[in-house]
Amino acid sequence: MKIATYNVNGVNGRLPVLLRWLEETQPDVACLQELKAPDEKFPLQAINDLGYNAIWHGQKSWNGVAILSRMPITETQRGLPGDPDDTHSRYIEAEVNGITIGCLYLPNGNPAPGPKFDYKLRWFERFTQHAAELYALGKPVVLTGDYNVIPTEQDAYKPERWVEDALFRPETRAAFKNLMAQGWTDALRKIYPDEVVYTFWDYFRNAYGRNAGLRIDHFLLNPQLDKRLLTAGVDRNVRGWDKTSDHGPVWIELAD
């Protein structure tokens, strides 16, 4: 079973890229972030035409998450629990083929410090609480998406340039470490413990051409899925396509 995550940076504006990638790589499940579209503008017909079912949680101009699946999909959670006043569309969860899949778009948090950074950390706390509840169920769980977290210096080109950024501040890395301490496995780092692996390249200064990237899109697996992990990777070439997102799709393959 192949599960992918992809921050599309606008599902309608980059629909040709998304459809081409789905056709070429054919993941069984694809988690999308940053739809930048309200629910009624989600391109369901084009997704269905490629053989995917879909659930989505949209928002006009900002945010938005979706899960596409070639198999039957059952939505189990829409929006991150813990704050009824939070209207951001940043989390959706489903069960597919016996696996609970959480798709998230964690707040960026810049400028930091400031209100946006405070919101990022509060969101992170709620997510960590929800992750603990899922972990305690003892069922196969994967939590994937754009975490907007650079976990270590290994995950950034010239990390010294990012020390004051919300993605790399000590508070952010500590929150990620606290989440991982529950027992999750970072799938990409398990497969590539020492390699340079990036999932995001800025549009500026020829970042993609220079491979001046960041690793901010992550797959976290609980022990039930960790033992089924076969391989993982980044479809780096997609970042080089015309009118593409600044993220590359990331994927894992699991044994049945």
Image: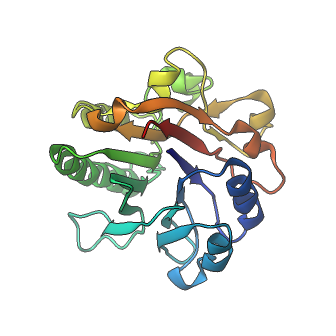
Farthest-out residue, front: 256
Res. 78 in view: no
Colouring scheme applied when the structure was drawn:
rainbow
Which residue does the image show at 65% across and 44% down from the upper left?
A: 248
Task: Tell which of 42 and 137 is nearer to you.
Answer: 137
Which residue does the image show at 78% across and 28% down from the upper left?
A: 210
The reply, left or right, for residue 213 in relation to residue 68 is right
Q: Is 15 rendered above or below residue 235? A: below
Locate residue 82, reporting x and y percent. Answer: 20, 63
Task: Tell which of 125 and 68 is nearer to you.
Answer: 68
Q: Is 103 rendered above or below residue 35? A: above
The reply, left or right, for residue 201 in relation to residue 4 is right
Which quarter of the rendered picture does the C terminus lie within?
top left
Locate residue 139, reporting x and y percent. Answer: 23, 46
Which residue does the image show at 75% across and 54% down from the upper left?
A: 244
Farthest-out residue, top: 194
Farthest-out residue, right: 242
Res. 218 in view: yes
The tally of labels here is 0
Locate residue 154, reporting x and y percent. Answer: 52, 20
Which residue does the image show at 44% across and 36% down from the upper left?
A: 255
Quadrant of residue 11 in the image?
Answer: bottom right
Locate residue 75, reporting x and y percent. Answer: 35, 69
Q: Is 215 rendered above or below residue 15? A: above
The reply, left or right, for residue 22 in relation to residue 6 is right
